[in-house]
Structure formats: C-alpha cells, structure tokens
Amino acid sequence: MHFARFNPIRFAHLPTPFEPLPGLTEHLARPGGGGPAVWVKRDDCTGLAGGGNKTRKLEFLLGDALANDADTLVTQGAIQSNHVRQTAAAAAKFGMKCEIVLEARTGSNAVDYNRSGNVLLDELLGATLRTVPGGTDMSLELAKVAAQVADAGGRPYVIPGGGSNAIGALGYAECAFELVAQANELGLEIDRIVTATGSAGTHAGLVAGLAVMGADIPVLGIGVRAPKKAQEANVFKLAVETAALLGHAERVTRDMVVADCDYVGTGYGLIDQAVIEALKLAARTDGILLDPVYSGKAMKGLIALSNAGAFDGETVVFLHTGGAQGLFGYQTELEGKL
Ligand SMILES: *Cc1c(COP(=O)(O)O)cnc(C)c1O
C-alpha cells in the first residue's frame, strides 16, 4: 500500500517494538495448556513527548495541515487527553500554535486530575487550554475556536477528537502493515489483535489496513466509553472511509468490526478495582506501564476474556496505545490501592 501518496510528515519512532510478554503469558496460563501467548505492539513508544497512538495519526494529519498552509492546530479531548498532549507536541515541533478545548467529561474535581498528568504537559508544550463542562457539543466548540483563530488572522486546522477521521486513521492502516511485516519476519502467526477502542480511529485504521492487505487477522476492540452497537457502527463507518482512501472500500465488511464494551465499568475515565488490578499485573509481570482510561481498561478486558477461555491456544497481540502520562492525573484515586 502506497502511504507516501498521502504526504505524511515523518516524526514518529517507527517501527515500534513488537515483543512477547512472557510474564503475563505465564500468569494467564490455564490448566490443560489453555490461555493465550500474549505479545505487545509498543505504540506507547512512538516517541513524541511520551508517545502513544495519536502520533501515527498526527503524521498524516500534520501532512494535511501543512499542505493546507495552516499555522494553528485546533483540537479537543477529555481533560486527561493523551491526544491533546501529542497534538500540542506536534504543533510545537512544527512551529505552529495549538488551541485546545478540554471537556470536563468525568466531573472530577481532584487537583491532580485537573492540573497534573497530561494537563501539566500540555501547558509545558505551550498549548492554549480552555475547559468546557461535560456534555458540551465539542464539534461546535472546535468550530467556534477555529473561527476565532481565523478572525485574528490565523490559519486554523481542526483535528477532531482523538484525531479520528479517515486521514488520521491511515496511521493505523499503516500500523497494520508494519505489524504484519514484523510477524512475518519472526515467523509468528497472529490469531488476534486486542486494542482499546474510543474515538475509533485506531480500531478502524487497523481493520481497514488488515482488510486491504487481506491479512485475515481479527481485531477485538475493548470499548472505553460508548455501548457496543454505537461503537461498532462508528468503527465500521470510519474503517470503510479509510479503506476508501486506500482505494478498496469494498474490502471492509461489517463482520470484521467487533467491539466488546462490557469493561467500561461506571463510565469513561472512571476506574474500578479490575482496572487497578490490570495496571498492577502488566507492571509487575513484564514492567509495562498502562494507563487508567484506555490501555488499562483494554487489559482488564483481555484478562477477563482470557480467564473465561476466549483466547485458549491463541497468539494474541495487545496493541499498547500508551497513556501512562495520565497515571499522574489519577494519583488521588490510585493512592493506597497499589
Ligand atoms: C486515544 C487513546 C486510545 C483510543 O484510541 P482511539 O483511536 O481514540 O479509539 C487508546 N489508548 C490511549 C492511551 C489513547 O490515548
């Protein structure tokens, strides 16, 4: 697939490492030889100001922004958004301004949630932050900020939440090619890929990339916010749009999109004991730092499904989407529970 056609700007540290997780694999082993062999694709190591999955999307989005002669990136996210941090870093790196709208989505009043973790880094990176209440129409807010930037003589480029449009999702179509090439080199057969799925670009890009190349590897998205029906619909729509950019929309079929949204718990960005256990397990078996909002919830799902026998005998690749910087925003909640 010819990704250079889309003129991405190259700044991510790629390819990201692809490694086995022997400690977690041993922990998940079930009597009679069941349980999965777990590998990890280290997209927490994409290299931009702490890294994470938004960096691959931003390579394509920045390419488009610069092609459109933009001088200001405008985007939005939850207060502890990793996407906002990576966008702020990309703006800094390319001499652009960065205007951010943060949504107080979890309703937390904790000082660490509102001031530390990703928020501290956003400010360090020089982004301009404004906060709106949970439930605000964020697309409308982005349009308002973009209009203000333009009124002041700037040239705004609006990036949707999570960088999840078809241009951004190309980054994960490309990741699918990268991962399959790594597995081929190792002679490793992948039975399934497990990833957190939120604003949908990661999941959709992977599905599109795998479908376009005909890899026949199922992807399981573990939802972090929306219910299954809505999440699958969002992912499918975006996967088709992404595959269309690659010239093969027809290769994505509805059955390729599977999300399990049973591990959200009480809501987006809210953590429960099983998430804390998942954070601890990955840290203490293989020294892997997950985040409380996305990769920790995906790991909570992976552990529960594995214990129920869902992955017996499979080689499962966990896509580590990053986010450990957000841990510091959850100090109050994690204190005394680790
Ligand atoms: C944004 C994010 C996700 C979800 O990716 P989407 O493309 O929004 O579905 C997963 N993990 C982390 C750490 C994230 O920041």
Image (cartoon, helix red, strand yellow):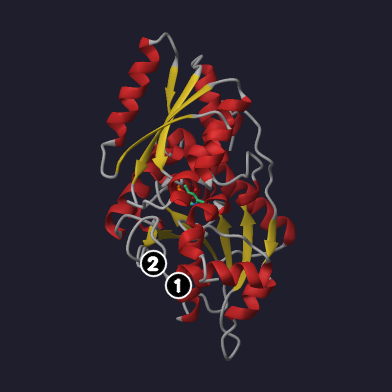
| N-term-proximal mark, 1 vs 2 | 2
The answer to whether residue 203 shows anywhere in this view is no
Specify whether residue 283 is in view: yes
SS for dot 1: helix
Place of residue 148 in the rendered image (x, y in percent of width and height, measured from the top left):
35, 17
Q: Amino acid at mark 1?
A: Ala
Asked whether the residues under the numbered discs 1 and 2 touch, taking CB atoms below 8 Å apart as contact, a structural biologist would say yes
Q: Quadrant of residue 290?
A: bottom right
Foreground mark, 1 or 2?
Answer: 1
Q: Is residue 23 left or right of residue 271?
A: right
- Quarter holding the N terminus is top right
The disc label shown at residue 274, or none: 1
Above/below status of 113 relative to 71: below
Total numbered labels: 2
Considering the numbered disc 2 on the image, is that residue within a helix, a strand or a loop? loop
Q: Position of residue 312 (x, y in %)?
A: 53, 79
Q: Is residue 130 above or below residue 243?
A: above
The part of the image, by quadrant, that contains residue 142 is top left
Residue 291 position in % (x across, y down): 53, 57
What residue is drawn where x is 53% and y is 18%? Answer: 67
Within-10-Å neighbours for mark 2: few <14, some 14–19, many 20+: many
Classify the position of the C terminus by image quarter.
bottom right
Residue at image position (60%, 68%) is 282
Q: Is mark 2 within 8 Å of ligand 1?
A: no
